[in-house]
Every structure is written in structure tokens, then in C-alpha cells.
């Protein structure tokens, strides 16, 4: 019998994600992967998976999953990211903890009090068919497995040789309140009249945010200079300024190229924290110096 | 060549012309410096996406030392022929903007071979350059919220075909049945390949 899990119910959105498919930009394929890479890595480390094993990215909790009858030994599972309250057959279980799910048992995720995305790692990783070398769903490109739905059965891969070494990881959860993100001025800061206004403005994450980008409300950045900017490569964490002036922070499924000027770029580890910001949550930017300065 | 900051996991290199862009992208691909995850050439820039923790100052010096010699001769590659029905919603407008008229736009678009400069935007989308320079037009002021798959468009110095329905701001001059993206095969148009548009029978 094969090892697998059955999706009983999903919340607003549940997707299979690993660490994405880097290296394909020349074909127009972005990296995609977990929006909060650090949280997926942590969940995988807890169950002694390779860090890039595929897990489930759960937006605002609500996922219910069952270990199918084919699991002759319990599935080892861990949760990381947004601390969704969880139980197994009604018994509360811990976050950032190593859990055992026996055949027929049901793991239920409630709504996390803070944070947006909870990651479920299963020892052995989800063994859905990879697309272009990755099991990640890229919602912009329409690549990878479809979003999870009730009744889906997801195969679990063979257990790795390594064994879990921790029962619980003492790691901070995504905070409520204002989230502060560190950024350096971007390649096209000169196309924005006052790029430092990014750091002075109290922003709010818009409800029109998704895996492609987080839209920010609460102010406008004026653009400077005329003429179209020829399209250029975009990075995760880029803060683009569209003509309306409300910035967009690009996340995991951002387009490979874009034509709006990039005023600033959020540091890589802070993009993970940005991916945990809920709609309506306040966001602030702090500008930090770049790694080098060009001679004048 | 100018290196622009792009956070702690990227470098954006700006060059004067497309041939230099392609030459730098080739040079990086031929001998990728440590930490480079992906190379994203575009019209005037090459983006290097990097492993977090890469020494940006050292990588910047390494990139500035790379030889950038635009390809002297175009290598012989296969020519991909794309049959187009020229009835796009912006054909008349492009005819007016360029002064060529609709028939003149079709003659210019089919009269000169294009080359795949780089990919981007969406899986299978190829930026085609090197066509008739009289076809250079700005994007539409108002992007369309949905452009049908197979739409053939112009923007700036480029022509391109939308692989799937998506929002888009290019001037649409026609449509094709060609399949630009297929998961098994990947992109129909690969960087460096020559493309010739023909009027669909």
C-alpha cells in the first residue's frame, strides 16, 4: 500500500510548494516556490527532510487532512510559519513540533492568530509529479499542481535516511502589529521623485495581495522622468512603482520581467516575513545601505 | 556597463545596446560566477539572481571584468516559420503611427526575419528583435486586461506572440495558431533562433 494523505477540506487556499524552479527565466518561467521559504525549510528540517522537499502552503488555515489507510507506519508531520492552532482527532498538537499521524487520523488546522501562511511538511515529502524540476504551483504562470481540493490524495515519498533530531524548534512566529521590512534602494530609485518616502510612509497591506505581489496602500510614490522603461528582470522583494503610485512588493510568483521602476528591494530574509503579512496589517520599510557604492 | 543595486540577492547590469546584453548573458552563462542562480537578459539589462549571502561587491567586480564582445556573425540556426492572420485590433493604429498603413505593416512584419533575443513575461514568451525598424511603436496607453493566446504584437523594438491569455499592453496586429509553450517540449522559440512571419493562407 502506498503512503499518502487525503485532503478532506481546504481553507481559502492550499497549494503544494517546494523551493521552486530557479534557472529557467530565459524561457519566461519564474522560480516560484514557497512564499515563506524559511518556514518551509524549517518544517522540512523538523521531519529530517531535505530542505527543498514539497509541502503544503496553507493560507489562513482551514486545512483538514487524513493519513490514508495505506500508511502502515505513522506519517511524521510538522507545521511551521503562521501558528495555526492544530489538532489530531481533537487533541491539540504543537506548532514547530514533530507530530505522528497514524492511518485514519485527521490533522485539522484552525485560523492562525497571526501570520498568513502555514507550512505542512510530511516526512518523505509530497511526491506529486514534478513540472520542470519542481512540484511548486506557480499561480501566475499556471505551472505545477492545481490548487488542492477536497478529495485530493497526495502521495508521500520514501522516508529519508536522516532521523528527526528535535521534538520542537524554539522559533519566533510571524508577528501581529506593524511589520518592519529592511530594504535597499533599488536599481530605478532615480525614476522615483522621493524614494525615501517609502520609509516615511505608514503602509497597509492590501486585500488585493497574492503570491505574485503584496500591494501597499496608504500613500503614493510619485514617479520622476518620462518615457517607458524597457522591460527588465525582476527579483523577489522588488518594490515596483506603477503609474498609480501605490507600490507593489513582488513575492514568489512575480513575473520574470517588468517595466515599472523598482524603487527599492527588500532583503531576502525579510521577503519571507513579508509573505506572512495579512491583508490590512501595517507595514513599514527601513532603508539600509547597499553592499557597495559606485564611485561618483 | 553599469552595475545597479538590486537587493542582497541580485545585481542588475545595464548596457547600451541589445547585442551587448546578449554578449554579457552569454559570457555569464559560459562561466557562471559562484552564487549565480539565474541570468535574465532583457532589452538593456542583464539581471543576475543570486544565492542569498553572495558577496555582491566581489561579484560586481567579476562581472565588470567579463569580456563583452557582441557576436560578430549571427550563428546559423533553424528558422521557425509562424503563420499569422493579420487582423489585430491595433493593426490600423500601428499603420497610422508608423505611416505604413495596414498593408505596409504586414509587408514590413513579414519582410524581415526576426531573432529571439530573450524570453520573459510568461512561459514561452519570446522577445523578437532585429525586424524592420520602421515598426517601432510604443505600447498602448491602456493595457488590455486580457489578450487572447496566439496574439501577435509589437512594442518598442520588439515583436512577440502571447503564449496564453494574459493581460498585456502590446499593439496587437494579428494572431496565430502556433503553440508557443508546451510543457513536454518547453518554449517553441529558443534564444538565438530566427523567426519568419508569413501571411496565413
Image (tube, rainbow, N blue to C red):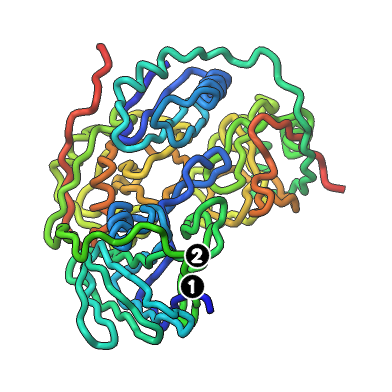
Tell me whether marks 2 and 1 sit on the same chain.
Answer: yes
Q: Which is nearer the N-term, disc 2 or disc 1?
A: 2
Q: Secondary structure at mark 2?
A: loop
Q: In the rendered image of this protein, does residue B54 appear above or below residue A248?
A: above
Q: In the rendered image of this protein, does residue A52 appear above or below residue B47?
A: below
Which residue is located at x 30 percent, y 57 percent?
A45
Is residue B138 shown left or right of residue B35?
right
Give whichever of A9, A40 is nearer the camera: A40
Q: Quadrant of residue B154?
A: top right
Q: Would residue B156 be seen by someone viewing this image from the given angle?
A: yes
In the picture of the structure, the residue carrying the numbered disc 2 is: A127
Give whichever of A167, B155 is nearer the camera: A167
Cα distance between the residues tagged 2 and 1? 7 Å
Q: In the rendered image of this protein, does residue A282 appear above or below residue A12?
A: above
Residues tagged 2 and 1 counted as in contact (Cβ below 8 A) = yes
> Local crowd at mark 1 within 10 Å, few (<14), some, or many (≥20)?
some
In the picture of the structure, the residue carrying the numbered disc 1 is: A154
Is residue A1 shown left or right of residue B52?
right
Which residue is located at x 52 percent, y 65 percent?
A128
Which chain is home to disc 1?
A: A
Q: Secondary structure at mark 1?
A: strand
> Local crowd at mark 2 within 10 Å, few (<14), some, or many (≥20)?
some
Which residue is located at x 22 percent, y 85 percent?
A91
Which residue is located at x 39 percent, y 63 percent?
A55
Residue A37 image offset from top left, x and y in percent:
33, 52
Amino acid at each position: 500500500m502506498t503512503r499518502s494523505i487525503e485532503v478532506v477540506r481546504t481553507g481559502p487556499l492550499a497549494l503544494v510548494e517546494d523551493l521552486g524552479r530557479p534557472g529557467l527565466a530565459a524561457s519566461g518561467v519564474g522560480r516560484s516556490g514557497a512564499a515563506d521559504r524559511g518556514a518551509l525549510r524549517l518544517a522540512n528540517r523538523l521531519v529530517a527532510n531535505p530542505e527543498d522537499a514539497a509541502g503544503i502552503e496553507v493560507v489562513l488555515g482551514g486545512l483538514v487532512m487524513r493519513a490514508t489507510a495505506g500508511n502502515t507506519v505513522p506519517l511524521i508531520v510538522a507545521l511551521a510559519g503562521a501558528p495555526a492552532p492544530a489538532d489530531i482527532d481533537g487533541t491539540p498538537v504543537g506548532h514547530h513540533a514533530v507530530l505522528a499521524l497514524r492511518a485514519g487520523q485527521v490533522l485539522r488546522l484552525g485560523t492562525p492568530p497571526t501570520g498568513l501562511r502555514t507550512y505542512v511538511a510530511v516526512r518523505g515529502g509530497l511526491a506529486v509529479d514534478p513540472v520542470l524540476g519542481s512540484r511548486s504551483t506557480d499561480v501566475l504562470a499556471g505551472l505545477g499542481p492545481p490548487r488542492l481540493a477536497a478529495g485530493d490524495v497526495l502521495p508521500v515519498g520514501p522516508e529519508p535516511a536522516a532521523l528527526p533530531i528535535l521534538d520542537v524548534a524554539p522559533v519566533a512566529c510571524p508577528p501581529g502589529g506593524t511589520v518592519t521590512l529592511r530594504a535597499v534602494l533599488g536599481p530605478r530609485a532615480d525614476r522615483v521623485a522621493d524614494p525615501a518616502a517609502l520609509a516615511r510612509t505608514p503602509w497597509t497591506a492590501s486585500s488585493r495581495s497574492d503570491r505574485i505581489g503584496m500591494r501597499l496602500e496608504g500613500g503614493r510614490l510619485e514617479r520622476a522622468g518620462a518615457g517607458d522603461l524597457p522591460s527588465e528582470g525582476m527579483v523577489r522583494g522588488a518594490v515596483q512603482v506603477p503609474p498609480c503610485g501605490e507600490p507593489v512588493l513582488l513575492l514568489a510568483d512575480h513575473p520574470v520581467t517588468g517595466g515599472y521602476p523598482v524603487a527599492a528591494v527588500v532583503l531576502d530574509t525579510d521577503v519571507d516575513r513579508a509573505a506572512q503579512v495579512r491583508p490590512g496589517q501595517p507595514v513599514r520599510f527601513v532603508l539600509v545601505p547597499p553592499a557597495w557604492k559606485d564611485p561618483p | 556597463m553599469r552595475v545597479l543595486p538590486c537587493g542582497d540577492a541580485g545585481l542588475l547590469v545595464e548596457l547600451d545596446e541589445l547585442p551587448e546584453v546578449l554578449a554579457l548573458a552569454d559570457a555569464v552563462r559560459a562561466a557562471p560566477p559562484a552564487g549565480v542562480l539565474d541570468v535574465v537578459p532583457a532589452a538593456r539589462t542583464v539581471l543576475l539572481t543570486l544565492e542569498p549571502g553572495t558577496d555582491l561587491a566581489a561579484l560586481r567586480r567579476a562581472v565588470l571584468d567579463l569580456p563583452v564582445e557582441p557576436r560578430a556573425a549571427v550563428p546559423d540556426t533553424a528558422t521557425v516559420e509562424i503563420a499569422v492572420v493579420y487582423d489585430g485590433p491595433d493593426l490600423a493604429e500601428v499603420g497610422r503611427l508608423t505611416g505604413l498603413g495596414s498593408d505596409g505593416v504586414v509587408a514590413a512584419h513579414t519582410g524581415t526575419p526576426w531573432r529571439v533575443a530573450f524570453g520573459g513575461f510568461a512561459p514561452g514568451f519570446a522577445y523578437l528583435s532585429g525586424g524592420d525598424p520602421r515598426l517601432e511603436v510604443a505600447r498602448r496607453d491602456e493595457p488590455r486586461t486580457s489578450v487572447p493566446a496566439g496574439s501577435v504584437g509589437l512594442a518598442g523594438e520588439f515583436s512577440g506572440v502571447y503564449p496564453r491569455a494574459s493581460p498585456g499592453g502590446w499593439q496587437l496586429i494579428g494572431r496565430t495558431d502556433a503553440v508557443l509553450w508546451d510543457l513536454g517540449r518547453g518554449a517553441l522559440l529558443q534564444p538565438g533562433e530566427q523567426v519568419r512571419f508569413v501571411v496565413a493562407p
